[in-house]
Amino acid sequence: MSAPNPNPGRLVLVPNTLDLGTDIEVELGEVLPQAVIARAARLGFWVCENAKTTRALLKRVDRLVPLTLPLQQIQISELPRPPKGGAARGATAAAPDLKPLLAPARAGHDVGLLSEAGLPAVADPGAALVQTAHAMGIAVEPLAGPSSLLLALAASGLNGQSFAFVGYLPVEASARAARIRELEVFSKRHGQTQLAIETPYRNDALLGALIEHLQPGTRLSIASGLTLPGCRCETRSVQQWRASKQPALGGRLPTVFSWLAG
Amino acid sequence: MSAPNPNPGRLVLVPNTLDLGTDIEVELGEVLPQAVIARAARLGFWVCENAKTTRALLKRVDRLVPLTLPLQQIQISELPRPPKGGAARGATAAAPDLKPLLAPARAGHDVGLLSEAGLPAVADPGAALVQTAHAMGIAVEPLAGPSSLLLALAASGLNGQSFAFVGYLPVEASARAARIRELEVFSKRHGQTQLAIETPYRNDALLGALIEHLQPGTRLSIASGLTLPGCRCETRSVQQWRASKQPALGGRLPTVFSWLAG
């Protein structure tokens, strides 16, 4: 931490909408506070997963609050892509040096961090940049915005006093079944709600596997298309899910799955 | 589910600000989307933890978007208080019948559910009402808003791909130390970030205990006064925390603690 700037900028965590990859574009005012939209309009430096979707968001911001700088003058840097399949654990250990991405903060400018959906640095590669900011002594400021995981938990009616997000389950069927059973045992022992997500085109396969492998008395919840028109939040026992026709989630809507053993 | 209403209302999960119990009143537009404020202004039926703080919020809403009904005509019902110390697990099993609170939804009116801070039904007693709504076939609609737990996680730079919220730790010192160590072992084995909260007047005691009992290489994060001016988000190794003077969190600011074993 040599030669600290007396007036460094901050790393500002800017929430995104939850409509990525869907055919729907929600109004920003439905999901983001007005002050957050205004703050985003003033930022001249961004770090993100995808520069193209960041520019698309900034165009939506501009329609509500004119951008301080012309879009072409806003500096947008992409995070290095995480190694394939290595995102779950310890992936940041071998990560490249992210300090250059925070050089504008050292020089006194706020830097926005944006994820593809919802809060940055949750279920995405942004956490490594936040870690770097802390190590550099750069202040980190999270702005209020939606998290699909927590909206799903709230809407589930399952235990919100104790819960875990376990990320993605294995894709291979027998490994997935084993993982589902392992998490259910843990849920039963600790009264802990388990949350998982899946790439949308595999949502129906995951729902089928959960209905097949969880115990009949376990309550299973789906939250699909959160904050979008036609948003669908349903919680039933596995027994009830089995007795009804499995709903088709389709391959586009982001969906959060949660369950609590009875 | 006899005699279902063909046009039932919904249970609408309305996020609250994060300034309860502090001396600060944030502008609603800093933390809540404009459409959420407008939706809150239209609701004539509410279920909440505390009618007084709900009325205070509705007065803040009214300054931005005039309430559809006069405040005195809005029906505000409090959730039954959970049995003391029994909130963590299985508390809903013996809960009183909450169906009467949803009678307005049966009659075709949307009912708002509000917590004292952030998202309802997360780390508060509202989940039982959501559960009742699902059982009655009443649609549940969560509105976008901030969760202090997820803002803290995002700002921590710790693992956002796998995390657990474990609620409150024991107050008694030796039980608390044992629980801290147990959670750290789990964090190390599974690479999982652990999140906990405490009643604000015990924040400094919990921080002291975490610094004392966690391993030197574990990273420990505090997020205090989220979304408020002077919000403070710091992540350091336990070794670094020990080498510096423990910051005084004071007894009023809501604080989220998180840690990840190295």
Image: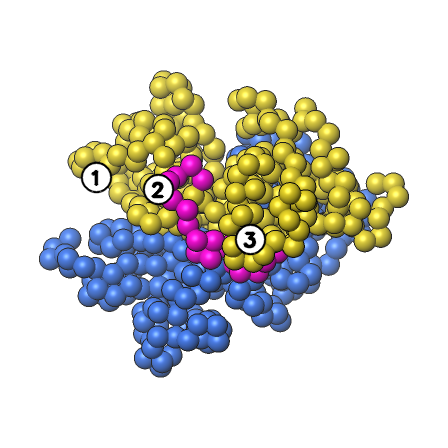
Chain colours: A blue, B yellow
Q: Chain of mark 1?
A: B
Residue pointed to by mark 1: B240
In-front residue for pair A213/A18: A18
Q: Position of residue A207 (x, y in %)?
A: 67, 51
Q: Position of residue A95 (x, y in %)?
A: 31, 58
Which labelled disc corresponds to residue B224? 2
Disc 3 is placed on an element classified as helix
Image vertical order of residue A93 relative to residue B221, above or below: below
Q: Position of residue B203 (x, y in %)?
A: 35, 31
Residue in the picture at 66% in, 44% down: B74
Q: Quadrant of residue A205?
A: bottom right
Residue in the picture at 53% in, 39% down: B53
Q: Chain of mark 2?
A: B
The residue under label 1 is which amino acid type?
Answer: Gln
Residue pointed to by mark 3: B62
Compare marks 2 and 1 and give the one earlier in the sequence: 2
Which labelled disc corresponds to residue A165? none
Compare marks 3 and 1 and give the one earlier in the sequence: 3
